[in-house]
Image: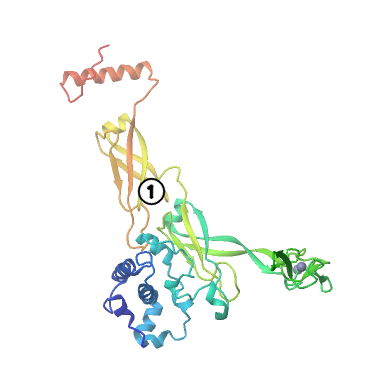
Amino acid sequence: MAKRDYYEVLGIDRDADQAVLKKAYRTLAMQNHPDKNPGDAQAAERMKQVNEAYAVLCDSRKRALYDRYGHAGLEGYTQEDIFRGVDFGSLFREFGLGGFGFGFGDSIFGGFFGGRNSARRGPRRGADLRYDLSVTLEEAAFGSVRTIELPKVEKCPACAGTGAQPDGLADCRRCHGTGQMVTEQRSGYSVIRQITVCGDCRGRGKTIKKACKECRGRGVNEKTREISVDIPAGCDTGYRIRLEGEGAGGDDLPGDLYVVIDVERHPVFERHGDDLYLQKEISITTASLGGQVEVPGLKGSLRLDIPEGTQTGTVLRITSKGIPSLNGRSRGDQYVVVKVVVPTKLSRREKELLRELEALRQRSGGESHGEDRKG
Ligand SMILES: [Zn+2]
Ligand SMILES: [Zn+2]
């Protein structure tokens, strides 16, 4: 049977953008997902096609190949390659569909990944890893490069993974080198014969008499490896960076590493999207007469004009001093919430002046609000 056109499978135009593509995929996933069609083999088959079509078309490189050469353009790709890079787990979560997670062993992915049928398909793909990375607000705002350390388990080169010195292996005494334990149990006229893996040698048939000095008999060495992570300017908590092939396991097909950003709380700024908020205390004189104050900014201090007669709680805006947007095309604003501070511990002279002010305002029948304290 000829393979169907991917665009046709998803029912979209050839120039459909990512949003249209995702919407079409969502609709079809909702219709054909096994959660909604328990036991329906045809729905599972359709889901398989839909997944594949989506996986190819959402990746600009694979899509370009497909657009130019059709299915032939992807002949060099294994199923694994085709699905790599698409996070169906989080897509399904987003759609509110069943937990297929990162596990690609499920039937709707064609059973190509991991698990039962994969033995003759060669190396298995390692697991995807998640690494939570805390960054400062400044790093998130302007981007940075961070180096993270990950543990790496590799086969001990000295003993090639056996855990023993060259002459240090001996036949397991318990299973006599077979790796198996056979027990027989008589029950009436029948004999129940049970074969289990030997617990002493874990089925290897050999035990270590002289342990490898490098790995102390473990057969593996744990090292750390350093990975450099580019933190894009404008990212926020929950932003994910995918590092292809940096996940766990397998020299052949390692999984991917997902670095998930967590932006730390800032002592001064509060972030809302790309905008920043902070509180600034000003004196009653500055609030009444107006003036200029300094407020902290992400990059050094900023000057802010306080208009005459500013009330506490007034929010003033400094444009384009917030967080740059992820696409780099715009920048958020910085908002300053003004708090007018009433002075305490006044000197006698200061009290006199304030009473004088109060008297003046009463005489002019001014806009002062009540609060007449005759003294
Ligand atoms: Zn070793
Ligand atoms: Zn044994």
Mark 1 highlights which residue?
A: 271
Q: Residue 336, relative to residue 106: is it above or below?
A: above
- The amino acid sitting under disc 1 is Arg
Of helix, strand and loop, which one carries label 1? strand
Answer with left or right where residue 36 lies relative to residue 194.
Answer: left
Q: In which quarter of the image is residue 42?
A: bottom left
Count of labels in the image: 1
Farthest left residue in view: 365
Q: x, y percentage for residue 80?
A: 48, 76
Q: x, y percentage for residue 179?
A: 74, 71
**233 vs 343, nearest the viewer:** 233
The crowding category of the residue bearing disc 1, from other C-alpha atoms within 10 Å (few below 14, some 14 to 19, many at least 20), is some
At 33% across and 63% down in the image, what residue appears? 329
Q: x, y percentage for residue 58?
A: 37, 73
At 45% across and 71% down in the image, what residue appears? 85
- Quarter of the image containing the N terminus? bottom left
